[in-house]
Image (spheres, rainbow, N blue to C red):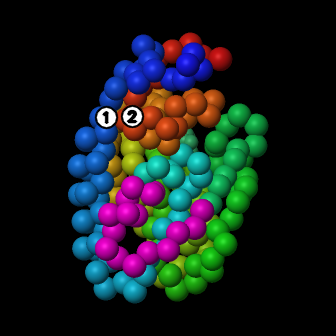
Amino acid sequence: MSHRQPATPEHLRVLISRQQIEARLDELAAQIDDDYAKSERLVCVGVLKGSIFFLVDLMKRLKTPAVVDFFQTSSYGSGTKSGELRVRKDVDMSLRGQDVLLIEDIVDTGYTLRTVLDLLRFRGARSVRLCALLDKKEAREVEVPIDYCGFRIANEFVVGYGLDYNERYRNLDFIAVYEGPTE
Ligand code: 5GP
């Protein structure tokens, strides 16, 4: 059918394959299980929407008892600079005394994560750590320590495995650099 996406459209350059993602997920989950071996339960907080594919696949591999909640931000106007971020959906659970693992798709300038991390820490969590699938280190404008990082990538716009371009491509099972027309 014409509206269907071909497996790898021409304007997508595969950067990280499904096999690479899966191997890295196994490693990350093992590392997280080790670090939280003494924790009674982990509250995994996914930042919507980009993190959901990563969150689900990672959580399925964890042996540590875990619960899930979500957080969503949006920016005022076009930028994501400090102070322009709005909370669209807050977590439903109380985070007081909890071990929180914030799960994000990509850290770019760092403004989004810096704000979200500060907000969650303010709620009295026992610990807050960050797990990000992708790290665009070169683009960083504010310092954000990533405790668990999937892959470091160059400063290019990527899609797939949860990441979108105008809401498209989230359901690709690989990560690709978008080289198509900009709308
Ligand atoms: P930051 O606040 O770190 O600049 O931006 C983080 C957010 O920007 C991510 O959660 C993601 O939604 C978006 N973003 C940054 N870089 C990319 C990219 O290469 N591809 C996509 N699809 N989104 C990105």
Q: Earlier in the sequence, mark 2 or mark 1?
A: 1
* 182 to 26, vertically: above or below: above
User: Split into 4 quadrants, where in the image is the C terminus?
Assistant: top right
Q: On residue 115, which mark appears? A: none
Residue of label 1: 16
Amino acid type, callout 1: Ile
Crowdedness of circle 1 by 10 Å Cα count: few (<14), some, many (20+)? some
User: Split into 4 quadrants, where in the image is the N terminus?
Assistant: top right
How far separated are the C-alphas under marks 2 and 1? 5 Å
Residue of label 2: 175
The residue at the point 73 percent across, 55 percent down is 88
Q: Is residue 105 magenta?
A: no
* 122 to 138, vertically: above or below: below
Query: Is 63 in front, or is 147?
Result: 63
Residue at disc 1, secondary structure: strand
Left or right of 157 on screen, residue 14: left
Q: Can residue 108 be seen in this view?
A: no
Query: Is 33 in front, or is 126?
Result: 33
Residue 147 image offset from top left, x and y in percent: 35, 61
Residue 103 image offset from top left, x and y in percent: 47, 58
Residues under numbered marks 2 and 1 in contact, where contact means CB atoms less than 8 Å apart: yes
Which stretch is magenta? 55-70
Crowdedness of circle 2 by 10 Å Cα count: few (<14), some, many (20+)? many
